[in-house]
Image: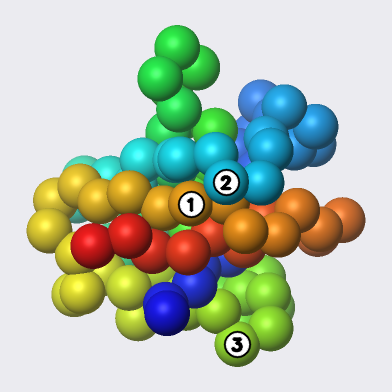
Amino acid sequence: MDFCSILHGLQITEYSFLEKEMIVYLKKEKDNEYDKEAISVNLPGLGKIGYVANSPYTVLGESYSAGRLYDKISEEASGKVRFILDKGVICEFIE
């Protein structure tokens, strides 16, 4: 199983709306000016809720960073929420 950490976006400061087993949608952001390996995390009806973490300071535990996950997914992929923590959310990458 491959896991990734999700960090909140600028508009979202907590994850109280997420639940375990919820499906999130991952999408590469090739035009992101801050991170060339950016992967946004999206929910239907809400849009972008954050990003897959891509820094050794923000990745939770042994989960994948966006850089490690970037070449493993196509343009879009799905993830399933597994753990909701104070510092972020860990989701399982679904192929």
Cβ atoms under marks 1 and 2 closer than 8 Å = yes
Q: Farthest residue to the top: give it.
A: 45
Given the image, on which type of amino acid does mark 3 rest? Glu
Sequence order check, earlier mark of 3 and 1:
3
Pointer 1 local density, CA inside 10 Å: few below 14, some 14–19, many at least 20: some
State the residue in front, 63 or 37: 63
Residue 52: in sight, yes or no? yes
Pointer 3 local density, CA inside 10 Å: few below 14, some 14–19, many at least 20: few
How far from the left and from the top, in percent, is residue 72? 21, 74
Q: CA distance from mark 1 to mark 2?
A: 5 Å
Q: Residue at x 60, y 87 (%)?
A: 62
Rendering quarter of residue 36: bottom left
Q: Residue at x 38, y 64 (%)?
A: 93
Q: Which mark is residue 62?
A: 3
State the residue in front, 22 or 63: 22
Q: Farthest residue to the front: give it.
A: 21
SS for dot 3: loop
Given the image, on which type of amino acid does mark 2 rest? Glu
Residue 34: in sight, yes or no? no
- Residue assigned mark 1: 80
Q: Is residue 82 above or below residue 46?
A: below
In the picture, measured across the screen, residue 12 lies left or right of residue 70, that is right
Q: Which mark is residue 21?
A: 2
